[in-house]
Amino acid sequence: MTTPGELPTRYMVIGHDGLPNGVVDLEELQTAAWKLAYALVAAVATGGDDAVDEHVKIWTDTVPEGSEGFIASCALSFTIRSIVAPLIDIIDGLGPELHIREKLADADTFAKETLGGRQ
């Protein structure tokens, strides 16, 4: 039970068919997402692609079934906002002649043109 003004931490998940699909605890989901985000960044920084692949394999075997998509999408958002964006700021500040922001925008345009639009 929540007190007035307090947001609940558990939410009912409704499927595309409008039927209840399960219950998620938002705090647990966010904690798992933060752990995944930092673990993947650490894996690529210290062990490269193979380390990332191994970590993802272990992760998919240990998270509760049905929560993978929620956790992965939150981890992606956290990684972009809290890790990649500050790195872009640092690169842009140290080497503005690299035009990192424009190159990333060009990469997005190229992906849309060659992969058929935005998902």
Image: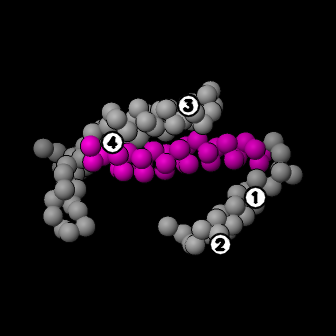
Sequence order check, earlier mark of 3 and 4: 4
Q: Quadrant of residue 87?
A: top right
Amino acid carrying mark 4 in the image = Leu
Residue at the spot of label 1: 103
Residue at the spot of label 3: 51
Residue at the spot of label 2: 113
Q: Residue 10: x percent and y percent?
A: 21, 46
For the residues labelled 3 and 4, say whether their Cβ atoms are less than 8 Å apart.
no
Amino acid carrying mark 1 in the image = Lys
Task: Quarter of the image for the N terminus: give it.
Answer: top left
For the residues labelled 2 and 3, say whether their Cβ atoms are less than 8 Å apart.
no
- Residue at left offset 70%, top offset 57%: 104
Q: What span is colored magenta in the figure?
A: 65-93
Vertical order, 42 against 79 (above or below): above
Q: CA distance from mark 2 to mark 4?
A: 34 Å
- Residue at left offset 81%, top offset 42%: 94
Q: Which mark is residue 29?
A: 4
